[in-house]
Amino acid sequence: MPSEKAFVFSVLLITNTKLMNTEALKNSLRDSVVTRWAMLFTVGFVLAANYYFYDALSPLKSTLTRELGFDSTDFGLFVSVYSVPNVFLLMAVFGGVILDKLGIRRTGFMFIAFMALGALLTAYGASDMYRNEGLGYAFMSSFMPGYSPELKMMLLGRFLFGLGAETSIVVISKIIVKWFKGKELALAFGVKLGLARTGSMLALMLSPRLINSEAGWTVATWFAAFFVTTALLVFLIYMMFDLKLDKQVEKSTLESKSDPFKFSDLGKLITNRSFIFVTLLCLTFYSAVFPFFAFSADFFKNKFGLTEIQSGDIAAMMPLGTMLFTPIFGFFVDKYGKAASLMIYGSLILTIVHLTFAFTTVTPYVMMVVLGLAFSLVPAAMWPSVAKMIDEKRIGSAYGFMFSVQNLGLWAFPILAGMILDGTNPVGTESLDYTYTMIMFSGLGIVGFIFALLLKREDKVSGYGLELPSNSK
Ligand SMILES: N[C@@H](Cc1c[nH]cn1)C(=O)NCC(=O)O
C-alpha cells in the first residue's frame, strides 16, 4: 500500500536525520578534547586582557595623585565609570539580547572592539601627547572645570571600555556553554575564571614596575591598552573555529533555535526566585570584592606602610589564590555538586576577611590568599548554577541581566569607598585610615551571606538541583 510505504519511509527518514544529527554532534570540533580546551584558552586570553586593563591602574592610585592630581573620590569615579553603560544604559542586558540575536562572532567582535577603543583612549588621556595640548585637550578643558581634562578623557575611555568589557564576558560565558555543556562545564568555568584572574594578577604585579620605565610612568597604561588591542586580534582566531563548528553541526542541534527576544523573557527571569537570589548574591558579593580590590594596594600601602611594588604584590595574592582554587572548586561542583553550599561558605569567609582587615593587623599576605579562597568558591559555583536555572537560548540575556545588576554595585561602591576615605581623613593626612571603608565591605559580605542561605533554601522548592553534580541535571 502506497500510504503505508510512505509512512515507513518518513519514519526511516526522521530516524536517519536524528541519527545524523547525533553523529554530527559526536564528531564535531567540540568533541575533540584538545580543540575545546584550546578554544577555552583562546577566549581566556581575551578575558585576561580585559581583567588586566580593569585592574591596571589600581596599584597606581598614589601615582595618579602625584602625576595627575587625582584625589580618592576622583579615583573611585574612574573605577566606577566602567559600570555606567551597564547600569544606566543597561548595556550588559542589551549586549546579552544582541548576543542571543546576532550570535557569538558578530557580538564578540563588536564589543571587544569597544574595549580596545576605550583602553586606547584611557591611555591617551593620561599621556604626555594629550597633556601637551593634544587632540581633544582643548575641548575637554572647555566644560566642568572642577574635573581635569585628563580625568575627563580617561573617564570617557573607561566608559567605552566598560561598555565593551561586560558584554564580552557574557559572550565568553556563552562560548563556554556552547563548547562544554554536557561535558566538564563547571571545570571549564573555573579555568576560564582562573585565566581572567591571571590578568588581574599580572596587572597588580606589572603596573607598579612599569611606572619606573625610562620612558615614563605612562608605559603602564599604554602596555595595558596594547594588551587589549592584541585580544581583539586573538578573538579573530576564535571566530574561525566558531564558524567551522557551526558549519559542522547544524545550528539547531548545538544552540537552541534563536527565538526573537521578548521583554516577557526578562519578566520570566525576574519572577524566578532562585535567579533573583543568585543575582542579588552576585551584586553584594562582587561589590565587596572588586571595589575593595581596586583600593586594596593603596590600603596595604597606607595601613602597613609598604611601597607601591610591595602593596601590588600582596594584592596579587588574591588572584593568584583564585587561579589555583577556582578550577579545583569547578571540578568539585561538576563531580559532587554542593554549589549552593559553596556559595554560603564563600560569603562567610569573605565577611571574616574584611572584618579582619578592618580591626586587626594580621599579615595581609595570608588574608589575601584566604580572600582568594572565598573568591573561588562563589564564582566557581555561581556561574554554572545559572546554566541549570535558565534555558540555553536565554542564557545570554540571563548573564547580561546579572551583570547589569552587579554593575550597580561596581558603580556605586568605588565612589562610596572614595567618599568615605576623603570624608574620614582630613586633607593632607599622611596615611589614610581605611577602617570605615572596610566596615562597609564587611556589611556587603553579610548581606551576600543571607542571599546565599536563601538561595539554598529556595533550591529545595525549585528543584534546579544546585546541590547535585553537573551531569545529573
Ligand atoms: N562582570 C565582571 C566584572 C569584572 C571585573 N573585572 C573585569 N570585569 C565579573 O563579575 N566577572 C565574573 C568574575 O568572577 O570575575
Image (tube, rainbow, N blue to C red):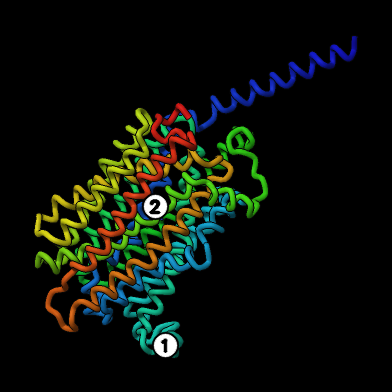
Residue 58, by quadrant, is bottom left
Tell me the CA gap for discs 2 and 1. Answer: 35 Å
**Residue 452: x %, y % from top left:** 36, 46
Residue type indicated by callout 2: Cys
Q: Relative to the observer, which residue lies in front, 128 or 331?
A: 331
Q: Which mark is residue 144?
A: 1
Residue 238: tell me if it is visible. Answer: no
Q: Which mark is residue 282?
A: 2
Label 2, ligand 1: CB separation under 8 Å: yes
Q: Where is the N terminus found, in terms of image quarters?
A: top right
Dot 2 falls on a residue whose secondary structure is helix
**Residue 263: x %, y % from top left:** 63, 55
Asked whether, in this view, residue 252 is left or right of residue 61, the answer is: right
Asked whether, in this view, residue 274 is left or right of residue 224, the answer is: right
Residue at the limit of the structure toward the top, as seen here:
1
Residue 272: tell me if it is visible. Answer: yes
Q: Quadrant of ligand 1?
A: bottom left
Residue type indicated by callout 1: Met
Q: Residues within 10 Å of mark 1 (few under 14, many from 20)?
A: few
**Residue 264: x %, y % from top left:** 63, 52
Dot 1 falls on a residue whose secondary structure is loop
The residue lying at 26 percent from left, 41 percent from top is 325
The label nearer to you, 2 versus 1, is 2
Asked whether, in this view, residue 41 is left or right of residue 92, the answer is: left
The residue lying at 23 percent from left, 51 percent from top is 318
